[in-house]
Image (cartoon, rainbow, N blue to C red):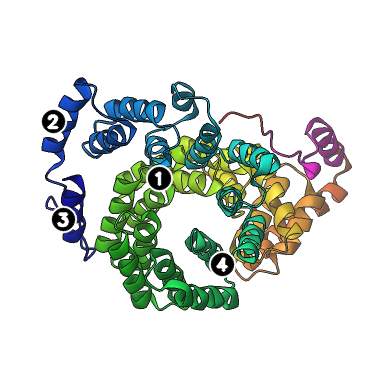
Amino acid sequence: MYSSGEKKRLDDIAEVSPPNDKSKNTVLKSLRLQLQKAHLAGSLDGYCLYLYGVVLKKLQLEKHALEILCEAIQSEPLYWGSWLELATLVSDREMLNDLVLPNCWMKDFFLAHTYLEIQMNESALEIYTKLMEQGFSKSTYVMAQIAIAYHNMRDLEKAISGFQDILKVDPYRLDNMDIYSNLLYVKEMRVELSNLAHNSCDIDKYRFETCCVIGNFYSLRTQHEKAVLYFQRALKLNPNYLSAWTLMGHEYMEMKNTSFAIQAYRQAIEVNKRDYRAWYGLGQTYEILKMPFYCLYYYKQAQQLRPYDSRMLVALGEAYEKLDKLKEAKKCFWKAHAVGDVEGMALIKLAKMYEKLNEEKQSAAAYTDYIRDAEARNATDRDELCHAYLYLAKYYYEHLKLEEAHENAQKCLDYPETKEDAKTLLRQIAARRMHTEDNRNNSNQFRQQNTNTPATGHLSPMNLTFTP
């Protein structure tokens, strides 16, 4: 009965159009009543308890589903399906620790899998490393999970290397190749992605992973219509395939079709509420639609799922800034810089936020750090660099540090945007220098002021223990 109802539901959404009330399994409620009676009578085995848990979960009775799935695992601890369904209901480590589970070897696999799901990647890696040492060194499943952990941690080189090792062991493997294709897409490794797409198609062109790989291949070639077509094919093969919904949302965004992008992202969230990419995609979509309050809500959800991801924090900070909540924005940019800024944007945004809040010393320190980092990585952010140089030139001039002011003003001459302002400031610096030469008494007074003024020529780095 469940399978029949589920097939009908999947057929209703096979065309990947915006979801509607028809795309629901209409037999769930009656099936729940039957299973409930059998459960009270104690006649359900581990497999039927698993089905009961799935039904409860689909009816959004998650607390009850959690209890039943734990009971299913106690009854049949070697059935991996029950463990997987239970993992989707765990939201944090505290909840995971509260579960009453049998102590068998499957529990380690469950814990590692769940740690990956709740973004506790280091803990997952620790368990998988132990499993490798305990006899699973040739398990392609464990190897793939380790590669996925590195993928989640944004260590793309190790993740790609991990998937390459898997293909050496099992060249016909298609499981998780969609994630590998995502990595190749991000790194713009066109040749490798093309080879993966052709090989996957030769192995089994009717696998949803194959369709996703080909979709990424066309997306990298900016053939977004073809990419959408293949993501739709993946969803016809597996409508609960999370990545395809999210990736299709990205493609609709590229095609400026915000309505369908929103529907795709929402469907991804319906499949898995822990998919930060879908929440983040919704935030971007509503940002384009200039709906800042919606944008803020979705970015908050993404940031809660990835609390140490600087991209989520920067996006959240920008949303606060657009709503003129500058102190909240400052906190986000500061934390993004503190946790390790992936895109190199947090520091300059933090400096500008200090500037807007008239926190001059902090702003100057942030601009100084930004310039140092930008020069170290040979950045070409001309607009940001020229603004930073000009701000520091004015800051040093106002604090009577004429050498430092002159040095930064000279650098501003290299940028058309700040050239005229720099010339004006250099004239003012020259005039003040002339004034100090002509009037020795004033010069002594200036020296006394410089003695009492902190050596801002060598601004200390921002205090990262500062709580905005």
In this orientation, which residue lies closer to the viewer: 433 or 391?
391
**Mark 1–mark 3 distance (CA, rounded to whole Å):** 34 Å
| Residue at the image point whose x is 81% and y is 37% from the top | 450
Q: Which residue is mark 3?
A: 8
Helix, strand or loop at disc 2?
Answer: helix
Say which amino acid is labelled 1. Answer: Tyr
Which residue type does callout 2 highlight? Leu
Which one is in front in this view, the residue at disc 2 or the one at disc 4?
A: 2
Q: Which residue is mark 2?
A: 33
- In the picture, the disc for residue 299 is 1
Q: Earlier in the sequence, mark 1 or mark 3?
A: 3
Q: Which residues are magenta?
A: 442-463
Q: Which residue is mark 4?
A: 184
Q: Of marks 2 and 4, which one's residue comes earlier in the chain?
A: 2
Q: Helix or strand or loop: what does disc 4 sit on?
A: helix
Q: Residue at x 51, y 47 (%)?
A: 314
Instruction: Check the picture and name the quadrant holding the C terminus.
Output: top right
Viewer-nearest residue: 340 or 52? 52
Pick the residue in front: 435 or 360. Answer: 360
Secondary structure of the residue carrying tag 3 is: helix
Kindly indicate the quadrant of the structure image that contains residue 46: top left
* Helix, strand or loop for the magenta stretch, by majority: helix
Mark 1, Cα crowd under 10 Å, few <14 / some 14-19 / many 20+, is many
